Amino acid sequence: MSFRSGIGYDSHRLVTGRPLVLGGVEIASERGLAGHSDADALAHALIDALLGAAGLGDIGEHFPDSEERYRDADSLVLLADAVALVRAAGFEPVNVDATIVMERPKLGDARAAMRSRLADALGIAVSDVNVKASTGEGIGFVGRGEGVAVIAIATLRRGQAGEVG
């Protein structure tokens, strides 16, 4: 059995008039993330990690923000679509780990819900999904409260093409 890992990164500006959605969970906040889709930076970083591990390019190749059909798209649907691409290429997600970097709001209680929603979209157990939170310690765009950044890693195992978790 062979394994492959991929890294994903995404960042979005915080703006008024948009909901803050991370890991498919709406977080109570005065500002949300700017973007073509729902701007779920956590789901986007995971998509890139999965696609990278499978050697399938990146999120922009498969779900370009130039296409109107992705306007306001639910990023968990895009994540499930990315998993289907990964499986069609002969891989199965094993686990994912991500760190959300933002000043506020604090994510404490929301992380369990994020893990559950992500596990459903990925087709893996909640115990195979980890979501951490950190701050920018007042440094850079995150530290000034201007945006959110997420870094993620995904591990895949080689399975049979079309095999379902």
Image: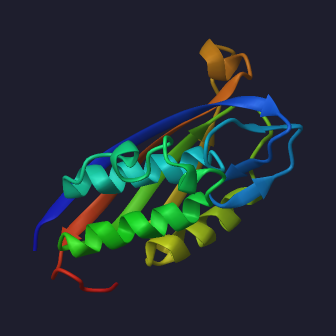
What residue is at 31 percent from the left and 86 percent from the top? 164
Residue at the bottom extreme, as displayed: 164
Q: State whether residue 93 appears in this view.
A: no
Residue 51 position, x and y percent, is 30, 54
Residue 129 position, x and y percent, is 49, 65
Q: Nearer the viewer, residue 29 or 57?
A: 57
Q: Nearer the viewer, residue 110 or 28?
A: 28
Q: Quadrant of residue 60?
A: top left
What residue is at 38 percent from the left and 63 percent from the top? 82
Q: Quadrant of residue 162?
A: bottom left
40 versus 75 height, above or below: above
Residue 15 position, x and y percent, is 78, 30
Quadrant where the image shows the C terminus: bottom left
102 versus 48 height, above or below: above
Q: Is residue 155 left or right of residue 115?
A: left
Q: State whether residue 20 appears in this view.
A: yes
Quadrant where the image shows the N terminus: bottom left
Residue at the left extreme, as displayed: 1
What residue is at 44 percent from the left and 38 percent from the top? 9
Residue 77 position, x and y percent, is 54, 67
